[in-house]
Amino acid sequence: MGNKIVVTNLIKIFGAHPQKALTLLQEGKSKSEILKETGLTVGINNISFTVQEGEIFVIMGLSGSGKSTILRCLNRLIEPSAGEILVDGQDIIKLKNKELRKFRQEKTAMVFQQFALLPHRTVLDNTVYGLEVQGVGKKEREEKAYKILEMVGLKGWEKKYPSQLSGGMKQRVGLARALTNDADILLMDEAFSALDPLIREEMQDELLSLQQKMNKTIVFITHDLNEALKLGDRIAFLRDGALVQIGTPEEITNNPADDYVAKFVRGVDRSKILTAGDVMKKPQPLITLRDGPSVALRIMKEHGISSVFVVDRERHLKGIITADMAVEARNAGIQSLADMKLEEGPIVSEDTPLFNTLSIMAESKMPMAVINAEEKLTGIIVRGSILAALAAGSTNSGSAVQGGENNA
Amino acid sequence: MPKFPLAAIIDQIVKWLVENFGVVLDAFSESCGEIIKGFEKYLNIVPWWLLILFFAVLAWKAGGWKLTVGTVLGLFFIYNLKLWPAFLSTLVLVLLSALVSIVIGIPLGIIAGRSDRFHWFITPILDFMQTMPSFVYLIPALLLFGIGKVPAVFATVIFAMPPVIRLTDLGIRQVPVDLVEVGTAFGSTPWQLLWKIQLPVALPTLMAGINQTMMLSLSMVVIASMIGAGGLGAGVLEAIGQLKIGMGFEYGVAVVIMAIILDRLSQGIGRSLRTEDRK
């Protein structure tokens, strides 16, 4: 995966004659000093970041933090005052009118907060808009639109007008319009903020599942931390037009860069961010199928535990053996664990949200096995480790640790 | 303090125009006059009931049965009052003036809607055109084009054009920012943005402008009878001159009927365009 978008020292000054403010910025003056001296607003203050191909990059911040401005700089709906924006290695700030239009047609597609559907066009005609301005033939563009509309669950609604749709459906059209364009980069400006909570969650799930199929590069703007944590492969925190922190959801929640981020993160339900992989312990001790019940008993005794996981030579999980079972097997004269029936405990994958493991844990007496994509045992979870992980959050965010991946 | 010679300056300008372009203007006036008379002649050949039927169909499309019945009754009443030829003559002048106003006004309104500088430039001119007493336009029109229908159209266009410019301008400016952003973000050319987004979204406001222009055209065409526009206005003028109260009232009622029909029809057409969009 390469760098899709590279933003370097991006600055946006609002107002006439931004040059004055730029000089002041270089002298190290603050945003409020510049406003006082020149009457110019610093919208974005020297921001650099990189978006990887195929990732969902969330820009998170409160209103007025400059997040929408950054997004609009990426397709130059707003002209940056200074800096460099490379998309696939091409500096888009240097593009002239015609090249810029081509860039917008082919590389980017945008989804808007208030949906921004054209009221005089049907769902279908809204969806084909991008292809229409590119001059793609009617038949071809409509065929494509029908396919995408079906994909976002709007089959049968093609001939309706936007005023006949609910909010959630309208945004599905907005999404379909962006997808039909077949651009590599989706720019989503608070795309789900205007929807009510249930529909919002539904749309988030939909976006994630679409993303699995389409593998676009998505820049997603939001002011909702839970949304950011759910969608973002990485999150950029923005305050007052400046970047505070960039990191994965785990990095952000575990190591907030400053009090501002910490304050946000404090309210987060950690069980929804942490995964089984985050809280599991090293799978020790383990025994293999070739071992016998006496070995199992000795290991349990050594470690002071009442059961142990059994794996084969490639570390594939074969089951659990408890002390009672081992005693019984030894008395029956069984030599190898391969010859006896083992207990099957709960198994989860590494990326299972901790939240989902809670109920499994509650129903089972056995420790939980964690496996990776190759189905090898990579860790175990006992009740104590879950409680410890959840408790860690409440103490951590209370005294924010300085550090983490800071303004990369 | 000496008086500023505004009147003298204007007189000089008009005199200069007449002296230098008189021949051209006369030729223009004459050929346009022929065209207008031609329209009138052909409309007079069309049987009155066929024309009423035509309006009835239009009313049916634009507003339903109530408007249809009203239109038919109103037009029949004008025919019954024996004002049909005068009605046709006024109708031609109104539609022609409105058409010229719209053809010039909509592009100007679009430019004003998209350029702040042009908006800033044209607004005081529009204020001037609209607030200047309408009679005043008759004098230069008379001097430039002589007596007849052409100066009437000229004066009417100047008087009736501002609303369509203003409302086109307003309509374009009122297109929501995010819809314009959609156009830009998907890589539309300025022309595509105008045709595919701005004009369709501004259409209801634009139609209101066309309606206003039509109404102002009618009122000015009646006044322009003072410089030989003919039609229903001429009847009113004659009635005033001879103090024939009843006759003046007949002509007046015909103007009112015509105004209501034109107003409802153009509004109805505007509305049907809009509802078709959002059905």
Image (cartoon, coloured by chain):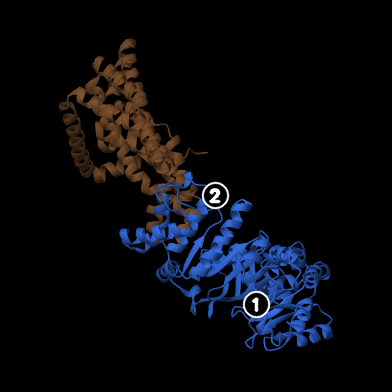
Q: Give a yes or no on whether discs 2 and 1 share a subunit.
A: yes
Q: Residues within 10 Å of mark 1 (few under 14, many from 20)?
A: many
Q: Which residue is mark 2?
A: A167
- Look at label 1 and name its amino acid: Ile
Residue A142 place in picture, x, y as percent: 35, 58
- Callout 2 secondary element: helix
| Residue closer to the observer: A105 or A148 | A148
Is A164 above or below relative to A259?
above
Among the chains pictured, the one given blue colouring is A
Determine if residue B61 is in view. Answer: yes
Q: Residue at x 45, y 39 (%)?
A: B128
Q: Kindly indicate the quadrant of the structure image that contains residue A389.
A: bottom right
- Callout 1 secondary element: strand
Is A217 above or below relative to A294?
above
Q: Kindly indicate the quadrant of the structure image that contains residue A25.
A: bottom right
| Residue closer to the observer: B8 or B267 | B267
Q: Which residue is mark 1?
A: A371
- Look at label 2 and name its amino acid: Gly
Q: Residue at x 79, y 78 (%)?
A: A323
